[in-house]
Image (cartoon, helix red, strand yellow):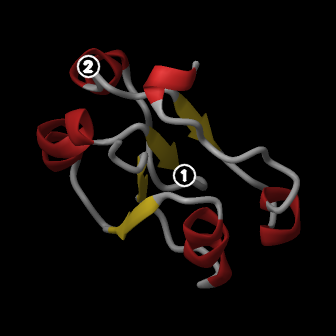
Amino acid sequence: MAKPKVLISDKMDPNAARIFEERGCDVDVITGQTPDELKAIIGQYDGLAIRSSTKVTPEILEAATNLKVITAPASVSTMSIFPPLRPRASW
């Protein structure tokens, strides 16, 4: 079974990626994307971690065919309490 994939699309503490990885996720950190660039790749991801730079529009949500979770943690310590993403088969 494939690991859930998470996109971190805004600048965050480097520990954010580590926390997702510790919970069994593959993580890509790709910041500074235009809405069209995000729309083009968001369908690959099960989770999206944002701060204030990424605007999740209806068009982006429509393209997010695999998305299960969007998180906007206030801090890395907040992320540590989120439960791990589960592969779709176990939901």
Q: Which residue is under mark 2?
A: 59
- Closest to the observer, 81 or 24: 24
Residue nearest the viewer, comparing 6 with 3: 3
| Quarter of the rendering occupied by the C terminus | top right
Q: Is residue 74 left or right of residue 19?
A: right
Q: Compare residues 89 and 56 and report the one nearer the observer.
A: 89
Q: Quadrant of residue 26?
A: bottom left
* Secondary structure category for the residue under label 1: loop
Q: Quadrant of residue 40?
A: top left
Task: Give the residue at x 78% y 70%.
Answer: 76
Q: Looking at the picture, which amino acid does disc 2 mark?
A: Glu
- What crowding class fits label 1: few (fewer than 14 Cα within 10 Å), some (14-19), or many (20 or more)? many
Give the side of residue 70 with respect to residue 38, left or right: right
The amino acid on which the numbered mark 1 sits, given as a three-letter code, is Ile
Question: Where 70 falls versus 14 (above or below)?
Answer: above
Quadrant into which the N terminus falls: top left
- Disc 1 to disc 2: CB gap under 8 Å: no
Give the residue drawn at x 31%, y 67%.
32
Q: Callout 2: few (<14), some (14-19), or many (20+) C-alpha neighbours within 10 Å?
A: few
Q: Tell me where residue 64 appears, x and y as whole percent.
A: 29, 26
Report which residue position mark 1 lands on: 50
Q: Is residue 49 above or below residue 90?
A: below
With 17 as the anchor, is 4 left or right in this view?
A: left
**Which dot marks residue 37?**
none
Q: Position of residue 58 (x, y in %)?
A: 35, 16
Q: Residue at x 77, y 44 (%)?
A: 83
- Helix, strand or loop under label 2: helix
